[in-house]
Amino acid sequence: NAGVTQTPKFRILKIGQSMTLQCTQDMNHNYMYWYRQDPGMGLKLIYYSVGAGITDKGEVPNGYNVSRSTTEDFPLRLELAAPSQTSVYFCASSQTGQGNNQPQHFGDGTRLSIL
Amino acid sequence: AQSVAQPEDQVNVAEGNPLTVKCTYSVSGNPYLFWYVQYPNRGLQFLLKYITGDNLVKGSYGFEAEFNKSQTSFHLKKPSALVSDSALYFCAVRDWGTDKLIFGTGTRLQVFP
């Protein structure tokens, strides 16, 4: 009963490096999301996808890119890491959109530090 | 614009006592409200939601939430707190304009034995 799986769990990057945060779900959910969580700030939506081949920007997309080639996978790419991107990143999925009031299922997060 | 506020950064309660975690909202249409819980080093878990109907909504782990339209509040409650309830709690509201969830800043609940 895996649900939403994120890898890696922890990562330290140097400024200017790039990396991909992986996210996969085994619930056949159409909708997937990427959030970042900063202390005292709640969760901010970075990107989301309503299905394979379709992605759209959320509230804080700058510095990130995503792709959705399959229903299961939704990787998040950081091209030029900056200290401001130090955060905890969460991937989530739901059967239908947030507007249809379906609860989201979250992964356990990736803790990313950029030094 | 829709918004949700959690006025308390932390709530402390003794085990066995009732607990309340506060949430107020601002929406231009019907409010669709959610509570999520986050345990250390884990993702958020859905607790309960209010869409329509009874003002008292029951959810997972013995939690319930009371919707109050006149006070624009959706407080999370539990009659008897457990030490294992210690976690970070998030209130969220549907944004009708973007069709996305807006999360509050979170309230840390600490239950002392």
Image (cartoon, coloured by chain):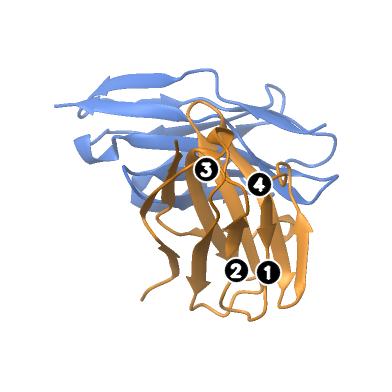
Q: Which dot, 4 or 3, sits closer to the camera?
A: 4
Q: Quadrant of the C terminus of chain B?
A: top left
- Residue A86's disc number: none
Q: Chain of mark 1?
A: A
Type of amino acid at the residue the image marks with label 2: Phe
Q: Chain of mark 2?
A: A
Q: Are marks 4 and 2 on the same chain?
A: yes
Could you give the CA–CA distance between mark 4 and mark 3, rounded to whole angstroms?
Answer: 17 Å
- Looking at the image, is A98 positioned above or below residue A85? below
Q: Chain of mark 4?
A: A
- Residue A74's disc number: 2
Disc 1 or 2, which lies upstream in sequence? 1
Which residue sits at x=34%, y=49%? B61
| Relative horizontal placement of residue B105, taking residue B60 as reference (left or right) | right
Question: Picture coordinates of residue A81 (x, y %)?
Answer: 57, 45
Could you give the CA–CA distance between mark 1 and mark 3, rounded to whole angstroms?
Answer: 29 Å
- The residue labelled by disc 1 is A67
Q: Quadrant of residue B82?
A: top left
Q: Residues within 10 Å of mark 2 (few under 14, many from 20)?
A: many
- Residue B35's disc number: 3
Type of amino acid at the residue the image marks with label 1: Ser
Q: Disc 1, disc 2: CB below 8 Å?
A: yes
- The residue labelled by disc 4 is A45
Could you give the CA–CA distance between mark 1 and mark 2, rounded to whole angstroms?
Answer: 6 Å
Disc 4 or 2, which lies upstream in sequence? 4
Q: Residues within 10 Å of mark 3 (few under 14, many from 20)?
A: many
Residue B66 seen in render: no
Which residue sits at x=50%, y=38%? A86
Residue A110 seen in render: yes
